[in-house]
């Protein structure tokens, strides 16, 4: 198992290198970067050359990328073209806000979605089920920013229960988390429902009932335990996306997270900041995805067995 | 979720509260189970009565769709509802009226007084729990023990069914089919139930494993004094393990008697058909004689004898009126109207008498 | 169980396409979805009667009028009629959603078939590249690409298409791997059919249904992503009346004129909802195993 985890972590390195190269290259191609705007229109060719050289623009892109990554691994992401602040600092001060939002909204989503999905599956075909399906379909179809604006209008402007934006302590968390949570909930409920539907007719539930296991335990331990993988996939996907910064929700609620930082950097053409932020976020994202992948092993012993025996199986496949 | 609860009448309540002093561990009378679908009703079980004494083994034999499994599920009050409905009948398990118990009471009876082994061991175990936990869960539900004691007991149970106790920490996927069935049996026997239902416990297993599992069940049954309802379509299994046999056809018991009655004094044409479709090793050149035709559509059962269309002795009388149960001896009953003619005898018996 | 046997009896004589269509029309949700999509297409056709200048023309004497019969959805900060703008904007969401998904589907199916059919080294390379593409959160990738290319309809189609191509690659590859070993494919090889012909005539038709289901499901997501990009100011931008941009333009006056954001958002939701319901219906219709 540990060997497997190490192997998976090592495998992340080429992925991160490729992704960072891709992002770096894309950003490098961006027309109208700050460097261009630093060249005055009446600059002599010599001045122009000097500025280009200062930013290595005369060298091939690969050189710039290598240099960038050399500094990157040392924790030096450079300074923002606009504010001159350290990019790593900027990112790390925003990150807790995003993580907090992601985790609270995940809790809201899971606490609502799993019971709802189970209920719908157990009463498949009834009115409860149909209502759940309709509600979740609407939830999935609602643009997050629109839901956010509606929540803002009702709870901030009309009822004045919560502040309209920014980070002003506990009350500020509520609206964005609820909005993000509701958004995640829809998909998770559907996934829970369909995963439970597949399990509910399983023979081993019959065995459990036959040995006198109380119905509640049959559902919540035996059935849910076996339906957990797809639910975990959905929740995990949502969590990684939210951790990567829900750009839209952070923008609606003026939430100082990494998503908004990235969006603002991109829009203000702060290439260096945007590049650093996107790469950092991507690293966070792939690490999260890996953790979820590993979490499967703890939910399902068969998957764990596959990891442990992965080597053996592969050898057999080759021969 | 389970069988529909019917209104309790006073008489039933008396039965429930009475101290259980009958000889019978399991008493089923006049059980009717239907599956009510949107536009039709499947009449799976149509008036079955069974009685089982302590330590006794009864075999329920019949082809697929005869209502054997529905009977087993109904005994536990576990007929899936919807669409299944237990229309009428009483089921007493060790004195507990299964059809009128509250859900919590029912959960206490299941696994403790009566338990069941299902057909397919591959899917009967929870894949994400260790086998030890699955056995211990049952023990903890029914007996005042803590987790460690329950686990200890689980290991003992595994040893009892011939699996080393230290494998308790393993998951079902690490066991073979025959081993899994042993685990299922260990779960079923973990609380020392008075009565065990075995729904085709060997059908999904390899032939070589079948005999092992059967021997083991026979042995355990004798050692623990459990009564057993063996559901099977295999007459060989019946001969090996049962004291009493009930032959089922289209939701009814067509012939009921001791092993001796059924095997040596066969009365019902269907039972005869079952025997004829068995290969005989010691008679060279003998052909298998299959029963022609198929079981009638359980949504459209005939008024008369359900076996009539396939029966070589059938007369017009068989078709017209419902068949009455005929008591042949103290232990032997048959559901066939051919015996209204006192001289009627099956070919098989004629042959036996000739020889 | 027995329900299913009856259903199959009932449908035995229909061709697969008719069968699916029949099951689809029996699904109430799918019919509703189809109706909404039909209405949207009518709206789209009607929107071509509207002149672009009519939706961009400012009329400062009529700013922030609440909804009335004259201006169904009210007027915005420039006095433009929001209803007209929303109707006109139908084309952006529909074309981006459809275009991006079609692009992703075509590219993804081709790449996925190659990976699945040839396996080995080719498969490894393609799948590793797909992994890399999947490692960047879709919204971020979209933002980066759009910021480079600039926010226009074709660019959004391209950006969002790239974001969703991985789903099609994975799905096609998986179904092809499942089908590749089947006897009828072996048989086609034995009679000397070319690889391309085997892929197109033997394998792809059988891998069709998961792709179709994914198609309807991802159209909704594509529309949402496009609207989100426009909302944060990176997609189709003002004065063009894209729905996401319309919602965004109303957010500053949300307190006083909430209707400016409400109606365009409602249209986004309805459109996405229609595709999602249709997707659900199609999934049920294409998968006879799912009983309902």
Image (spheres, helix red, strand yellow):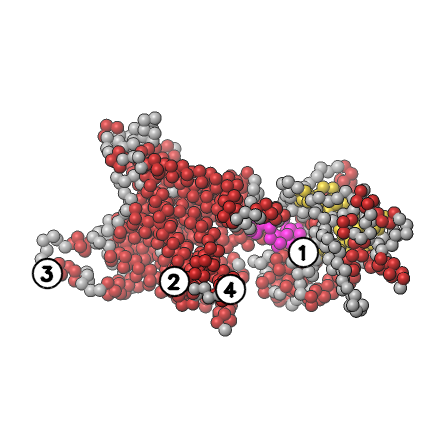
Q: Position of residue C280 (x, y in %)?
A: 48, 45
Residue A46 or residue C58, whichever sits in front: C58
Query: Spatial distance from mark 1 to mark 3, Cα to Cα?
Result: 88 Å
* Subunit ID for the residue under disc 3: A
Q: CA distance from mark 2 to mark 4?
A: 27 Å
Q: Which residue is mark 2?
A: C126
Foreground label between 2 and 1: 2
Rendered position, B123 above or below C15 = below
Q: Residue at x 70, y 39 (%)?
A: B6
Look at discs 3 and 4 and give the one toward the viewer.
4
Q: Mark 3 near mark 4, Cβ–Cβ under 8 Å?
A: no
Q: How far across and how far down the image is residue C112, in percent?
A: 41, 59
In this view, the residue farthest toward the front is C191
- Name the chain letter of the residue that bears numbered label 1: B
Q: Residues within 10 Å of mark 4 (few under 14, many from 20)?
A: few
* Residue B257 in the image, given as x and y percentages of width and height: 83, 54
Q: Nearer the viewer, residue C254 or A230?
A: A230
Q: CA distance from mark 4 to mark 1?
A: 41 Å
Earlier-in-chain disc, 2 versus 4: 2
Is there CB contact under 8 Å for labels 2 and 4? no
Looking at the rendering, the stretch of residues picked out in magenta corresponds to: A196-218
By secondary structure, the bulk of the magenta-drawn segment is best described as helix
């Amino acid at each position: 198992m540990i060997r497997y985890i190490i192997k998976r972590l090592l495998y992340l390195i080429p992925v991160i290198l490729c992704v960072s190269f891709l992002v770096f290259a894309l950003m490098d191609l961006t027309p109208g970067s700050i460097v261009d705007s630093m060249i005055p229109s009446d600059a002599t060719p010599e001045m122009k050359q000097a500025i280009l050289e200062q930013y290595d623009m005369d060298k091939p892109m690969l050189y710039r990328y290598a240099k960038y990554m050399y500094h990157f691994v040392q924790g030096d992401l450079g300074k923002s073209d606009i504010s001159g602040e350290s990019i790593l600092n900027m990112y790390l001060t925003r990150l807790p806000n995003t993580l907090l939002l992601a985790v609270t909204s995940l809790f809201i989503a899971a606490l609502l979605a799993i019971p709802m999905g189970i209920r719908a599956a157990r009463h498949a075909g009834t009115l409860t089920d149909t209502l759940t399906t309709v509600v979740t379909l609407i939830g999935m179809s609602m643009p997050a920013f629109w839901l956010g604006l509606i929540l803002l209008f009702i709870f901030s402007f009309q009822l004045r229960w919560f502040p309209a934006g920014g980070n002003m302590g506990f009350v500020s968390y509520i609206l964005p988390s609820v909005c993000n949570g509701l958004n995640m909930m829809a998909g998770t409920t559907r996934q829970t429902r369909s995963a439970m539907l597949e399990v509910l007719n399983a023979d081993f539930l019959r065995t459990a009932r036959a040995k006198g296991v109380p119905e509640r335990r049959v559902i919540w331990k035996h059935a849910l335990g076996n339906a957990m993988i797809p639910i975990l996939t959905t929740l995990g996907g949502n969590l990684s996306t939210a951790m990567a910064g829900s750009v839209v929700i952070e923008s609606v609620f003026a939430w100082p997270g990494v998503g908004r930082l990235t969006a603002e950097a991109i829009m203000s053409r702060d290439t260096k900041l945007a590049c650093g932020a996107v790469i950092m976020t991507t690293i966070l994202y792939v690490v999260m995805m890996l953790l979820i992948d590993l979490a499967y092993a703890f939910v399902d012993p068969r998957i764990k067995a596959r990891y442990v025996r992965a080597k053996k199986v592969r050898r057999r496949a080759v021969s | 979720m389970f069988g529909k609860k019917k209104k309790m009448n006073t008489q039933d309540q008396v039965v429930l509260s009475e101290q259980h002093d009958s000889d019978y561990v399991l008493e089923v009378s006049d059980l009717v189970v239907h599956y009510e679908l949107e536009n039709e009703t499947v009449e799976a079980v149509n008036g079955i009565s069974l009685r089982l004494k302590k330590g006794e083994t009864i075999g329920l034999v019949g082809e697929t769709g005869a209502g054997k499994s529905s009977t087993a599920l109904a005994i536990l009050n576990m007929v899936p509802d919807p669409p299944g409905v237990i229309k009428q009948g009483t089921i007493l398990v060790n004195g507990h009226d299964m059809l009128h118990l509250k859900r919590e009471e029912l959960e206490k009876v299941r696994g403790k007084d009566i338990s069941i082994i299902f057909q397919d061991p591959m899917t009967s175990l929870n894949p994400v729990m260790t086998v030890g936990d699955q056995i211990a869960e049952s023990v903890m539900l029914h007996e005042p023990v803590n987790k460690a004691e329950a686990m200890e007991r689980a290991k003992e149970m595994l040893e009892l069914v011939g699996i080393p106790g230290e494998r308790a920490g393993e998951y079902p996927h690490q066991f073979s089919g025959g081993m899994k069935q042993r685990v299922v049996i260990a779960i079923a026997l973990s609380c020392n139930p008075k009565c065990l239902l075995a729904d085709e416990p060997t059908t999904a297993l390899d032939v070589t494993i079948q005999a092992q599992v059967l021997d083991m069940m026979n042995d355990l049954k004798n050692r623990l004094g459990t009564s057993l309802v063996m559901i099977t379509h295999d007459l060989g299994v019946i001969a090996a393990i049962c004291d009493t046999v009930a032959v089922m056809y289209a939701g009814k018991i067509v012939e009921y008697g001791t092993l001796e009655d059924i095997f040596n004094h066969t009365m019902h044409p269907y039972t005869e058909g079952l025997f004829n479709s068995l290969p005989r090793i010691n008679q060279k050149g003998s052909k298998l004689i299959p029963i022609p035709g198929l079981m009638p559509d359980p949504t459209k059962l005939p008024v008369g004898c359900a076996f009539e269309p396939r029966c070589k002795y059938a007369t017009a009388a068989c078709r017209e009126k419902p068949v009455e149960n005929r008591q042949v001896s103290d232990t032997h009953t048959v559901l066939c109207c051919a015996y209204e003619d006192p001289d009627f005898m099956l070919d098989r018996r004629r042959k036996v008498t000739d020889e | 169980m027995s329900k299913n046997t009856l259903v199959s009896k009932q449908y035995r004589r229909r061709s697969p396409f008719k069968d699916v269509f029949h099951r689809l029309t029996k699904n109430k949700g799918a019919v509703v979805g189809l109706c909404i999509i039909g209405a949207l297409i009518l709206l789209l056709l009607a929107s071509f009667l509207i002149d672009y200048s009519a939706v961009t023309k400012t009329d400062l004497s009529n700013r922030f009028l609440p909804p009335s019969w004259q201006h169904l959805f009210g007027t915005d900060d420039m006095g433009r009629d929001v209803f007209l703008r929303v109707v006109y904007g139908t084309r952006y969401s529909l074309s981006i959603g459809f275009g991006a998904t079609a692009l992703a589907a075509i590219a993804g199916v081709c790449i996925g078939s190659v990976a699945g059919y040839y396996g080995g080294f080719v498969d490894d390379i393609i799948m590793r590249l797909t992994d890399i593409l999947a490692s960047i959160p879709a919204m971020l990738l979209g933002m980066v690409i759009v910021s480079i290319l600039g926010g226009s309809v074709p660019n959004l189609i391209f950006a969002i298409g790239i974001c969703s191509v991985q789903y099609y690659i994975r799905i096609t590859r998986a179904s092809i791997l499942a089908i590749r070993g089947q006897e009828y494919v072996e048989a086609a090889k034995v009679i000397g059919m070319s690889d391309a012909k085997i892929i197109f005539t033997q394998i792809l038709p059988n891998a069709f249904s998961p792709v179709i289901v994914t198609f309807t499901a991802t159209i909704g997501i594509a529309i949402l992503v496009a609207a989100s990009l426009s909302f944060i100011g990176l997609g189709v931008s003002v004065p063009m009346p894209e729905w996401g941009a319309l919602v965004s333009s109303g957010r500053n006056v949300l307190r006083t004129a909430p209707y400016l954001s409400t109606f365009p958002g409602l249209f986004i939701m309805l459109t996405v909802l229609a595709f999602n319901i249709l997707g659900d219906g199609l999934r049920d219709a294409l998968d006879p195993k799912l009983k309902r």
